[in-house]
Image (spheres, rainbow, N blue to C red):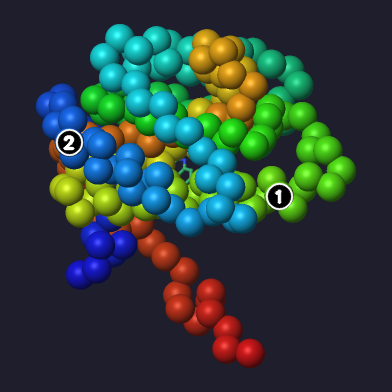
Amino acid sequence: MSIYEERKSIRKYKPDMIPDETLREILEAGRLAPSAKNRQPWKFLVAVGEKKEEICALMEKGIMKQKKSRMMPEKFKKGLASAENTLRIMREAPVLVLVLNTHAGDPYKPVMFGKRVSEIHDSLSIGAAVENMCLRAQELEIGSLWIGNTVFAHSEITEYLGTKDQLSCAVSLGYADEKPAGRPRKTFEEVVKFL
Ligand SMILES: Cc1cc2nc3c(=O)[nH]c(=O)nc-3n(C[C@H](O)[C@H](O)[C@H](O)COP(=O)(O)O)c2cc1C
């Protein structure tokens, strides 16, 4: 089986810490990813122990704030249950990597005219870096979860970090304590068309 077939989102972790060298190899895979115009619009902030707990506390604060918000559409509120589950996973996994987009800002603000294309390209580049890290983690027998739900605590976490960069997503890392079956995928015919 190829590495991309072996990789699964891991949502249950053992408490054991990843060796420093292994963690560095995973981050290196992110650093070496391709990017639009080779802009490399990323920063990877690694949180373990107390720092990770502080970030999780901010995530919880963000979720609570969103829950109380009357501005939020009902559909979006449903995502909060998923965010709470993600928070449990973030607490359980020994390592959390926050992924900043250094070429973008607050995702809740409109994108300035003319910046839309480069913002799309930078987000794609970040996707490549995160997938590189998840695949390298799999090769090194480390479980990973790509986390987009940090968006619920964007202002809380970026203020804590003292950055104006966009918190694009996060990645939880650790030794897997589950062997999940593969999530379903659309069929080849559904997604591929030979023109
Ligand atoms: C951009 C992105 C954001 C994601 N955010 C979350 C998240 O916040 N919480 C979570 O539990 N899973 C998250 N996932 C994992 C997806 O749910 C998962 O990749 C999908 O269900 C397919 O399962 P698999 O990764 O095991 O193949 C995210 C995946 C991607 C690519």
Quarter-wise, where is residue 94 in the image? top left
**Percent x, y for residue 169?**
50, 35
> Which image quarter has ligand 1?
top left
Residue that protrudes farthest toward the front in the picture: 38
Residue located at (34% from left, 21% from top) = 47
Residue located at (26% from left, 14% from top) = 49
Q: How far apart are marks 1 and 2 (CA)?
A: 34 Å
Residue located at (24% from left, 68% from top) = 2
Quarter-wise, where is residue 68 in the image? top right
Left or right: 37 with respect to 134? right
Q: Which amino acid does label 2 sit on?
A: Glu
Residue located at (50% from left, 50% from top) = 127
Quarter-wise, where is residue 22 in the image? top left
- Which secondary structure lies at badge 2? helix
Decide if residue 85 is in sight here.
Answer: no
Disc number for residue 118: 1
In depth, the one of 122 and 157 nearer the eye is 122
Q: Which amino acid does label 1 sit on?
A: Ser
Few, some or many residues within 10 Å of mark 2 (<14, 14–19, 20+): few
If the image is split into quadrants, where does the N terminus sit? bottom left
In depth, the one of 191 and 75 nearer the eye is 191
The residue identified by callout 2 is: 21
Up-down: is 13 above or below 141? above
- Which secondary structure lies at badge 1? helix
**Percent x, y for residue 124?**
57, 53
Left or right: 8 with respect to 127? left
